Amino acid sequence: MILQRKNPLASVDNALKFTNLDGICCGDKGAAVVCTYTATLGSINGTTAVSLVNLGGVDHTLDGAYLVNQERERDALVANIEQIIRNLGYDGKGNVTQSFASGTMTITVEYSDLEFGYLGTDATPFIPTACQVIGDVVSFPGVCDAGAAIYKSGTDLIVKPYAPGAITNVTINDGGGAVYNGDLTLGTTGDAEVTAGTDGGKVITVDGGAGGQNWSGSTTFTVTVTQSGCAVWTRVVKLVY
């Protein structure tokens, strides 16, 4: 799990590690939403290189342009990303991995409190595929972290919002307007249905084949999550249909 460290200068190999969720001192978080991320870069050839990663909304230039058709270059890319994570004050050792098959590289990030934006360009976004609330929500009220797993299943768009506080509204915009705008009351609204997830959260499923959506190619979705007493959380994700 990638969390902000209390002592960024401590060795990443220490068995005992303290993070800002441990409640040791003032300014610590009581709870947070952490998400897993996946970035997929396809049609890789001998000139396909990656030289930038976006973390926490900021572009970070890598130490080189990694030719990702080569395993040693992919491993070096992951090691460079982990180094940037550590430089930002987070513990990321072993939480970022890569795989390669049929000309496609996939980078997977385990649950992270640091937001992963994109790899190289925004054409290769890190897709949040699962999220969960961690920490002591009861003892630390008013925590404003939020997040959402956002992915597709067939032609459908799946959004699972999470927040330590009460979620009052979720808006999903596909670039042409809101395909969902409401709270998390169970039921159907237009082409969207809110159901109960197996983990106790709520799941919004938007029928991509109904209502004239018929998404095709690269579609940009903007998801906003509002919880009581907090600013709106926003996530922009590109999905290919």
Image: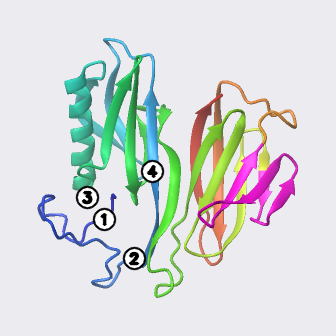
Q: Give the image's coloring scheme.
A: rainbow
Residue drawn at the location 65% of the way across and 24% of the way down: 217
User: Does label 3 or label 1 sit earlier along the sequence?
Assistant: 1
Give the magenta part as a residue range. 180-206
Task: Residue 91: give its label.
Answer: 3
Contact? badges 4 and 1 (CB < 8 Å)? no
Q: How far apart are marks 4 and 2 (CA)?
A: 19 Å
Q: Nearer the viewer, mark 3 or mark 4?
A: 4
User: Does label 1 or label 2 sit earlier along the sequence?
Assistant: 1
Q: Which of marks 4 and 1 is in front?
A: 4
Residue drawn at the location 42% of the way across and 79% of the way down: 30
Q: Distance between the residues labelled 3 and 4?
A: 15 Å
Q: What residue type is labelled 2?
A: Lys
Is disc 4 placed on a helix, strand or loop?
strand
User: Does label 3 or label 4 sit earlier along the sequence?
Assistant: 4
Whole-percent x, y for residue 43 in the image? 44, 16
**193 or 63: nearer the viewer:** 193
Is disc 2 placed on a helix, strand or loop?
loop
Contact? badges 4 and 2 (CB < 8 Å)? no
Q: What residue type is labelled 4?
A: Thr
Contact? badges 3 and 4 (CB < 8 Å)? no
Whole-percent x, y for residue 124 in the image? 47, 32
Task: Residue 29: give its label.
Answer: 2
Q: Does the magenta stretch include residue 199?
A: yes
Image height of 133 relative to 188, above or below: below
Image height of 229 relative to 53, above or below: below
Q: How far apart are marks 3 and 1 (CA)?
A: 7 Å
Whole-percent x, y for residue 241 in the image? 66, 28
Q: Please name the residue that numbered disc 4 is placed on.
A: 36
